[in-house]
Image: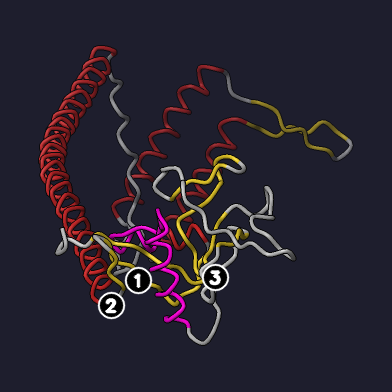
Amino acid sequence: MNVKQLQMCLIWNLDTTLISLFWEEKEVGFGFTLTTKAKTLNTLTCDGLGVLCVCVCVCVFHQAYEPEVKRTRGDVPDILPEPEAEPTSPVSDFENSYNYVLSRLASMDLAIHKLNVGHYTLDVKVSQLMDRLSRMDAKVGELEDSIREVYQHSKDNRKEIGRLEGCEKGQRIGYKCYLVYNSLEDYAGASRKCIERGGRMAMPRDRKEQEALADYVKNFFHPGNWPVWLGVNDLRSEGLYLFDDGTRVTYFQWRKHFLSSQPDGGRRENCVAMSSDDGDWWDHYCDRTMNYMCEFDDRVAL
């Protein structure tokens, strides 16, 4: 008989014993049998102890003859219940929070220190940059002064060259030199060009200068007839003719003819030009473009 058959036999005997302990059959007639409790409480208790002893013996016998089961690789081991976590006390939670706050404050203090160091470094860099910018600004100021000085020298040289050119190529009359420029400019442009060359627009102040300039202009444009600007105008007040340097004109050489006498432009024509064929003066619109004549001081004669 193997172990399993022995276990089944013991279980059947145990069931039969329990039924016999608790129940009994009685005939009640008419062929029926009534099953009732036949044992008293004391007997049940005593028999129950015997049954308990039998059960214990069966369990011991079953454990003694239970074959050992070998676990193979991959079997799931018995899961042991995890131990319950010990409850934390309020004091330990407070200490943990306090330590956490202290650690965060320490981190913030370190970050502020790094920020202060960076701010100081930035201040040093800005100070160095401002110092360099200050030195650069001083250098730029010196450079601007040098440029202005060079520009002024250039203007002076250009004026001196213009004066020398006027006296070399033009006509000397007394202590002045006159040069006609075959370039079309309005009155303001002609005045500016003469000043840039170190002179001014021609201003005949008496008959001698007027006749000398008339001959010079006539020979310059011969055989044509081209008017040239003179430094004479009445821009400040109608009928009040002034030279380009602001002095009042005392000698005039207006064209006199029965068909057209000058000046005849009124308030519209305020600038004066000399005709190259006869040297007479004509008033014209100041924005008209024509040739012009400049005068220069003859320093050699002086």
**Residue 16 highlighted magenta (yes or no):** no
* Viewer-nearest residue: 293 or 124: 293
The disc, 2 or 1, on the residue closer to the chain's N-terminal end is 2
Kindly check if marks 2 and 1 are in contact, taking CB atoms under 8 A apart as contact: yes
Percent x, y of residue 61? 33, 49
Magenta residues, start to end: 193-221
Residue 179, disc:
1
Percent x, y of residue 201? 40, 59
Return the residue at label 3: 275
Classified by dominant secondary structure, the portion drawn in magenta counts as helix
Q: Is residue 41 above or below residue 153?
A: above
Type of the residue with mark 2: Lys
Q: Would you say 224 lies left or right of 54 here? A: right
Query: Tag 1, which secondary structure?
Result: strand
Q: From the viewer's perspective, is the residue at label 2 or at label 3 nearer?
A: 3
Type of the residue with mark 3: Ser
Crowdedness near tag 3: few (<14), some (14–19) or many (≥20) residues, C-alpha within 10 Å: some
